[in-house]
Image (cartoon, rainbow, N blue to C red):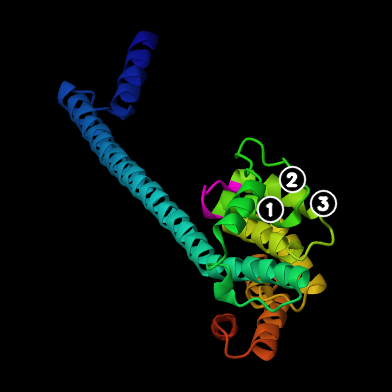
Amino acid sequence: MVGASLLLISTAQAAQAPVYNLSNESVAEKLANLERVVNSRTRNQQRVQDQIDGMQSEISEIRGRIEEQNYQIEKILQRQRELLLAFDIQSQQLQEASELSNAELTKRSLVTGRTTEPNAVASSSPAETTNTAASTIVRPSPSTPEVSSGNDEVDYKAAVDLILKQRDTKAAIPALQEFVKTYPQSKFKSNAHYWLGQIFYNEQNWEQARNQFGTLYTQYPSSSKVPDATLKLGIIAKNLSDRAKAREYFESVVANHANTTSAKLAQEQINLL
């Protein structure tokens, strides 16, 4: 009796238990779905990686082009600086020759007590020409710019020739600096400061250029090179982000040196501020 009862209870419990579908087809379907999801994510990741690789390649190409363009721009700027220096050299040659010729004429007139005409130099006698050539000091080579003859005119010409003829601005810097120290009272000292400023300006050494042009601007206001030096002081101040000082220099050129090329350039700079 008891055994029959237990059998009935066991049969009833078995009938009430839930039934799970654990067939092979259900498991295979789930695995297939999971595989499709994984494959889809893998393909998406691959597409993203391909896009990243493509963008990195484009960025590298753009960087290469930028570097090439920067190189070309630097070459253009360097060529421009060389042309500006060449232009300054050519524009100053006549003025330098005129100043040196006038100095020689004045020296001769003091000795003879007569006024010497400019063409008198060309008509001087062979003996005078020979004596002048014999008394000429050999200009120092670029390797020895510090050589001093004791004559400010000769040493100044030697230093400037390093720029005008030999195009050796590196050697000209110590030669001009030595000239300034050796001949503090020379009439060519202002020109030496100008040439030093011009060399540093073309090298974009703004501080050194400002010092040299500033000395010319403050100590030699009557120099013929002051208009150009003042203009470049303004450009230097502009490059150093001192727009107020730049305007001051530009306006000084326009006000004090009207009808000059420097004044026209200064006005253009003012319009750009």
Instruction: Identify the mark at residue 73; answer none if there is no mark.
Output: none
Say few, some or many: other residues with alpha carbon within 10 Å of mark 3 (under 14 / 14 to 19 / 20 or more).
few
| Residue 45 located left or right of residue 162 | left
Q: Which residue is mark 2?
A: 149
| Residue 13 located left or right of residue 247 | left
User: Is 209 placed above or below 217 here?
Assistant: above
Q: Secondary structure at mark 2?
A: loop
* Nearer to me, 107 or 158: 107
Q: Along the polypeptide, which appears first: circle 2 or circle 1?
A: 2
Q: For the residue marked with disc 3, what is the amino acid?
A: Lys
Give the quarter of the figure containing the N terminus.
top left
Q: Position of residue 15 (x, y in %)?
A: 28, 26
Name the residue at 67% across, 49% down.
135
Q: Which residue is mark 1?
A: 154
Kindly report which numbered mark, 2 or 3, lies closer to the viewer in this rendering. 2
Is disc 2 in contact with disc 1, using a CB cutoff of under 8 Å? yes
Q: Which quadrant of the structure image shows residue 18?
A: top left
Q: For the residue marked with disc 1, what is the amino acid?
A: Val
Question: Quick check: is 86 in the magenta stretch?
Answer: no
Q: For the residue marked with disc 2, what is the amino acid?
A: Ser
| Residue 236 located left or right of residue 165 | right
Q: Position of residue 121 (x, y in %)?
A: 58, 68
Name the residue at 68% across, 90% down.
255
Give the quarter of the figure containing the C terminus.
bottom right
* Nearer to me, 199 or 21: 199
Instruction: Identify the mark at residue 181; answer none if there is no mark.
Output: 3
Distance between the Cα atoms at labels 3 and 1? 15 Å
How many marks overall? 3
Q: Along the polypeptide, which appears first: circle 2 or circle 3?
A: 2
Name the residue at 17% across, 21% down.
24
Find the magenta span and give its range.
164-169
Say few, some or many: other residues with alpha carbon within 10 Å of mark 2 (under 14 / 14 to 19 / 20 or more).
some
